[in-house]
Image (cartoon, rainbow, N blue to C red):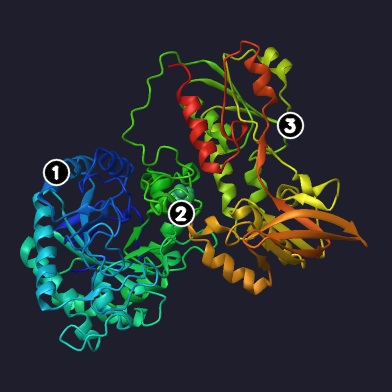
Amino acid sequence: MSRDVGGADPQKTLRIGPFTLRNRMIFPAHLTNFSSGGTITEQHIAYYEARARGGAAMIITEEHTVHPSDRPYEKLIRGWDPAVLPGYRRLTDTVHRHGTRILAQLNHNGAQGSSMYTGRPLWSPGTDPDPLFREVPMAIGEPEIAELVDGYSDVARRCIDGGFDGVEIQCSQASILRAFLASGTNPRTDLYGGDLHGRARLLLEVVARVRAEIGPDHVVGVRLSGYDGTDGGIDVDDAVQVARMLETTGHIDYLNTSVGVATETLHLIEAPMSTPHGYSLFVPSTIRAAVSLPVVGVGRFTRPDQVRAALSDGVCDLVGAVRAQIADPEFAGKVLSGLDDEVRPCIGCNQECIGRVGLGRWIGCTVNPRAGRESVLLPEVRSPGRRVLVVGGGPAGLQAAATAAHRGHVVTLCEREASLGGQVRGAATAPHRAELLSMVTSLEAECLRAGVEIRTGIDVVIAVVEELRPDAVIVATGARPLRPAWAGESQRVVDVRDVLEGRAEPSGRILVVDDLGFHEATSVAELLADRGCDVTVCTPGMIVGQDLGLTLDMDGWLRRAHEKGIGMVPDVAVAGLVVRDNSLHVSLVHHPTGKTRVLTVDGVVVATHQAPVDELWTALSESGICVSRVGDAVAPRRAHAAILEGDRAALELGV
Ligand code: SF4
């Protein structure tokens, strides 16, 4: 086993075990929630096929559990069930047709789960509950350990019978093997506890049994946590020692890496937009320096230059990019072809990938409306060349224009403002939110490549439409802020958009009212705190920015809010406002108790619901012109809905 060393670039092939990978980019394991009845579905097959067709050298599927005691979520692939075999074969045949290798990840989640689905106790090295699931597990004995090792071996065999090129053994984010490895979760005093060698015993036994079962003609890899970020968790020194132990066995062909634990430090795994690129590369580079096995680096690779730098700097031998390939299934191929400007980049929003999966729904993507829907056939265009007018250059309008142009229509997009982007442009001015803008710039570039005529600074009224005489109009005119009744006429009560879009510059003591529970209020609070304001955020919710937990932004927000001295008042509704002595006196009702307190401030910024800008839609609807409307012009929501509806409306043209 040797590694192709030095100065790698994405095009270079790489030998891992018995196979040669065609390039250096892989699509690593991640949950999709596509499974039905514990088996592979057509949704899986189409999703993975799109990334294989897009150029990925190797796909590692999401975890296949190795034992019935493990079912932390509903849609887990049950590798122990022979019913999985037909789906395995359909999936692997499909992926292989594109020259892509495919491995199955094997796992048991241990205590990082719930007994809700199985009705059986969780398995763990000890009895400490996971901090997120808070369920006390049973400490497994030698009979269960033997069953577990058999499970890995049996499922590895089934995967090979199903056409997989090999398996990856998870010893990372959510794994009983990682729990055995870490001193903080392994209190055992038997052969499987004690020092690192004892704690690694189970992993090494599993590796040996799996290799013995599937032989030398298939790949065996291990995904190893390099930094758990928890008390008593694995750190990079532990990981280096374990990597050396694994290499010494001679049983494995590559090492994959990870940071974070799927429950307590999940924000380190699918790091949100506020996390710097390259934050986790110290793990693969340290491990790579210590072993000669090929090493995979992961962690927020969203642009081709980051891939090239990691490879040429010797950080890793293979780049594992999950979200980059969810956002753009052709990411790998574009990197190989140098089509950097054509990548639709992942923006690190986590809204439709981890955010949806965390709610038990199948994976999607804010910027890629087809992610998770690859198995849905697109309607045929029977009459291309229709003249389409798109009104509004936010995400909905841009996506509608791009899709319509790709489908062979002649598209003009008109935007009232001087620049495109709608609300995204303002939102991207907030601290740690700048990457939002690439949603707009990449769509704009795509529109131009597809031949869309873009006109800015034009206010489209019905007379303009009648003059342009399009065959169809798509109205994407967005939304306008609603002013709460309690705000009265005070000029010192403004909307978050007024601040983010530069129309208002409040100063002094500022109350931010968070009615939306997402980035709007927290963004403006940070922006104003950075400008020297004394900021308090109030909300009727139990916590400010309550949806930030879903996108893994909560930890970062709370840490930064603390550092910036931002105060928070939960469980209150604004009941009224009085202007007196040059100050605003805001009454806040604590809704669980009905008690009122008054906060005296110099200004109020409101993050509240909006209303559709639908005058053009209404006028056109009554004119007999073929018209549809999308995004916030229908009902103000988040960016994913705008992009999805823009795509849908354009797909329906000319069919
Ligand atoms: Fe990236 Fe956001 Fe898409 Fe997830 S939903 S893949 S974070 S752009």
Please indicate whether residue 489 sits to the left or right of residue 625 in the image.
Answer: right
Residue at the spot of label 3: 457
Real-space CA distance between mark 2 and mark 3, rounded to the nearest whole angstrom: 32 Å
Q: Position of residue 47 (x, y in %)?
A: 31, 42
> Identity of the amino acid at label 2?
Thr
Nearest to N terminus: mark 3 or mark 1:
1
Q: Secondary structure at mark 3?
A: loop
Taking the image as shown, residue 219 lies to the left or right of residue 493, namely left
Give left or right: position of 92 versus 578: left
Q: Position of residue 599 (x, y in %)?
A: 78, 64
Q: Quadrant of residue 50?
A: top left
The answer to whether residue 396 is visible is: yes
Report x, y in % for residue 341.
50, 44
Q: Is residue 215 visible?
A: no
The 10 Å Cα crowd at callout 1, few under 14, some 14 to 19, many 20 or more, is: some
Q: Residue at x 34, y 42 (%)?
A: 54
- Amino acid under label 3? Gly
Sequence-earlier tag: 2 or 3 = 2
Residue 564: name its quadrant. bottom right
Quick check: is the Cβ at mark 3 less than 8 Å away from ligand 1? Answer: no
Q: Is the residue marked by circle 2 packed among few (<14), some (14-19), or many (20+) residues within 10 Å? A: many
Q: Secondary structure at mark 1?
A: helix
Determine whether label 2 and label 3 are within 8 Å by CB.
Answer: no
Q: Which residue is mark 1?
A: 89
* Residue with the mark numbered 2: 302
Front of the two marks 1 and 2 = 1
